[in-house]
């Protein structure tokens, strides 16, 4: 037993607004971002901080490659993930040394959402240097590594098969 408490923050169920700045469509960045940013802050501040501080715990946020590299994601989604990455770094500085805060930033992953992509899925895989999409296990192993690395805080680790290196 490690005697270590861990909080993993995964935002699910956010409305995805598919739009393009080039088309001049209106979108609510603040409304979409509030779920990621405010939800994570509230969880750490109100629930996790006292418990994690007592046990020298770790918070792991699940961001996205979209928050690092401009690409095909919607603008609000990418902006909220970029904010989550910055919030990870800011909280790491604020909560050290008692609590470590890190994040993972997966690229496109092999999930039910990507199963129906057809030709677009095959094209996405061709653009990944390692030749496949991430699996849940790939992401989980990086999370475990961050948890078990006591000298890592404020880090946002890409889990993208190298796709963040291209274009």
Image: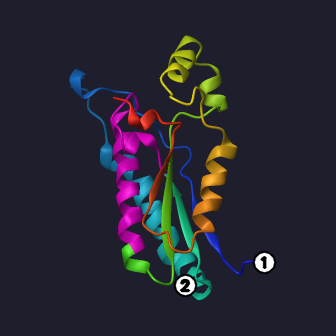
Closer-to-camera residue (124/73) = 124
Q: Residue furthest front?
A: 129
Closer-to-camera residue (25/73) = 73
Q: Which mark is residue 1?
A: 1
> What residue is shown at x 64% (from left), y 45% (from top)?
138
Location of residue 110 in the rendering, given as x and y in whole percent from the top left corner: 64, 31
Magenta stretch: dominant secondary structure? helix
The quadrant in which residue 5 appears is bottom right
**Element under label 2?**
helix
**In the rendered view, would you say 7 is above or below 67?**
below
Tell me which label, 1 or 2, sits earlier in the chain: 1
The quadrant in which residue 27 appears is top left
Figure coloring: rainbow
**In the rendered view, would you say 14 is above or below 114?**
below
**Element under label 1?**
loop
**In the rendered view, would you say 127 is above or below 56?**
above
**In the rendered view, would you say 107 is above or below 45?**
above
88 drawn magenta: yes
Q: Residue furthest top?
A: 119
Location of residue 161 in the rendering, given as x and y in whole percent from the top left corner: 53, 36
Label 2 neighbour load within 10 Å: few <14, some 14-19, many 20+? some
Q: Please give left or right for residue 165 compared with residue 103 in the image.
A: left
Q: Residue furthest bottom?
A: 54
Residue wearing tag 2: 53
Closer-to-camera residue (21/102) = 102
Q: Which residues are magenta?
A: 63-92
> What residue is shown at x 63% (from left), y 70% (from top)?
6
137 drawn magenta: no
> What residue is shown at x 61% (from left), y 57% (from top)?
143
Q: Please give left or right for residue 26 compared with residue 73 in the image.
A: left
Label 1 neighbour load within 10 Å: few <14, some 14-19, many 20+? few
């Amino acid at each position: 037993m490690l005697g270590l408490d861990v909080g993993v923050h995964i935002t699910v169920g956010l409305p995805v607004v598919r739009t393009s700045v080039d088309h001049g469509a209106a979108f609510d960045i603040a409304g979409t971002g509030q779920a990621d940013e405010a939800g994570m802050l509230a969880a750490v501040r109100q629930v996790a901080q006292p418990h994690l501080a007592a046990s020298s715990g770790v918070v792991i946020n699940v961001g996205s490659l979209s928050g690092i590299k401009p690409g095909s994601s919607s603008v609000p989604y990418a902006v909220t993930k970029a904010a989550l990455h910055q919030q990870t770094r800011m909280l790491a500085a604020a909560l050290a040394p008692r609590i470590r805060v890190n994040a993972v930033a997966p690229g496109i992953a092999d999930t039910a959402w990507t199963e129906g992509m057809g030709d677009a899925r095959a094209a996405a895989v061709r653009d990944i240097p390692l030749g496949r999409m991430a699996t849940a296990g790939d992401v989980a192993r990086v999370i475990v590594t961050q948890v078990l690395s006591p000298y890592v805080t404020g880090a946002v680790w890409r889990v993208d098969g190298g796709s963040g290196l291209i274009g």
